[in-house]
Image: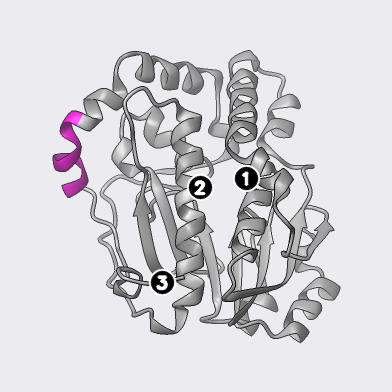
């Protein structure tokens, strides 16, 4: 059995993630450190003096879609993740860091938490996995599965599991998976389906971590795609929904094979045929 610590947020998708992972009979979650909601994208937008109606509507639709996808499971499943609520950014405080070090987990899994610094980084080198919603190295920073859809590039939507380092989405890649699309999808449906698939894949990664092999380095993209929260504008939301109204997903599905061939990802052979 693998003994792990989870570092995550407190939005519904994060609750789903930690509770689902902890139900695996081959995984023991010592503790989950759940950062608060004081620095979410919605709070950033609310404080912005620029027009925000479209941005807030999009974020409200995302919250509603998360409830539709995750709330039944979250409400009815036992919680074996041993959650500890902390303020955003406090995971690097000495008392929390030392508690994690003293617990000596086999792995630390980070999903949706603050940037991690020493001493945690150095204490768990090679045993600290970052779950990044996005395909590195193609898209980095914030909204890495939002911006591909704004930019008419659905082939860049996915998830990356990487060894964590001090950079922003720059760690050594362990494994990746792509988003699955269906005709008529909305942005939130695509994102939530990916979170479900990613959560199952994380369980497989944890259970089979001793068998993972070192993967080659993907070529650096010719175009740098690094976004920050301040890049989330009204115009970007308008463009997103214009793309969907204009048949973005249907067009992508008709061109899927060629598009995927142009965007290679890394799939660890240790996860190709595994059991939970």
Residues at marks 1 and 2 touching, judged by CB atoms closer than 8 Å: yes
* Image vertical order of residue 157 relative to residue 176, above or below: above
Q: Which residue is drawn at 44% across and 18% down?
A: 241
User: Is residue 271 magenta-colored?
Assistant: no
Q: Which residue is identified by label 3?
A: 275
Q: Would you say residue 168 is visible in this rendering?
A: no
In the rendered structure, find residue 195 and report the number of the disc placed on it: 2
Q: Which residue is identified by label 1?
A: 13
Q: Quadrant of the N terminus?
A: bottom right
Q: What stretch is highlighted in magenta?
A: 254-261
Q: Which residue is drawn at 71% across and 33% down?
A: 44
Q: Earlier in the sequence, mark 1 or mark 2?
A: 1
- Mark 2 lies on a secondary structure that is helix
User: Is residue 256 magenta-colored?
Assistant: yes
**Residue 135 coordinates in the image, percent (x, y):** 38, 51
Crowding at dot 2, Cα within 10 Å, few <14 / some 14-19 / many 20+, comes out as many
Q: Earlier in the sequence, mark 3 or mark 2?
A: 2
């Amino acid at each position: 059995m693998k003994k792990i610590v989870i570092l995550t947020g407190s939005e519904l998708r994060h609750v789903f993630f930690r509770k689902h992972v902890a139900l695996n009979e081959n995984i023991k979650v010592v503790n989950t450190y759940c950062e608060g909601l004081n620095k979410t994208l919605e709070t950033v937008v609310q404080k912005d003096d620029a027009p925000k109606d479209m941005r807030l509507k999009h974020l409200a639709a995302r919250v509603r879609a998360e409830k539709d996808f995750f709330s039944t499971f979250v409400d009815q499943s036992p919680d074996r993740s041993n959650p500890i609520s902390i303020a955003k950014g406090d995971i690097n405080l000495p008392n929390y860091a030392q508690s994690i070090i003293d617990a000596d987990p086999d792995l630390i899994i980070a999903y949706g938490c603050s940037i991690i610094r020493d001493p945690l980084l150095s204490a768990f080198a090679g045993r600290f996995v970052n779950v990044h919603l996005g395909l590195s190295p193609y898209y980095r920073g914030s909204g890495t599965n939002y911006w591909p859809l704004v930019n008419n590039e659905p082939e860049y939507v996915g998830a990356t599991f990487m060894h964590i380092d001090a950079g922003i989405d720059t760690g050594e890649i362990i494994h990746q998976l792509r988003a699955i699309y269906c005709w008529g999808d909305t942005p939130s449906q695509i994102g939530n389906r990916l979170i479900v698939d990613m959560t199952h894949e994380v369980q497989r990664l944890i259970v089979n971590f001793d068998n993972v092999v070192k993967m080659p380095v993907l070529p650096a993209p010719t175009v740098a795609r690094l976004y920050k929260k301040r890049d989330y504008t009204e115009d970007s939301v308008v463009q997103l929904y214009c793309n969907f109204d204009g048949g973005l997903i249907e067009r992508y599905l008709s061109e899927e094979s060629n598009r995927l061939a142009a965007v290679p990802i890394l799939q660890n052979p240790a996860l190709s045929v595994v059991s939970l």
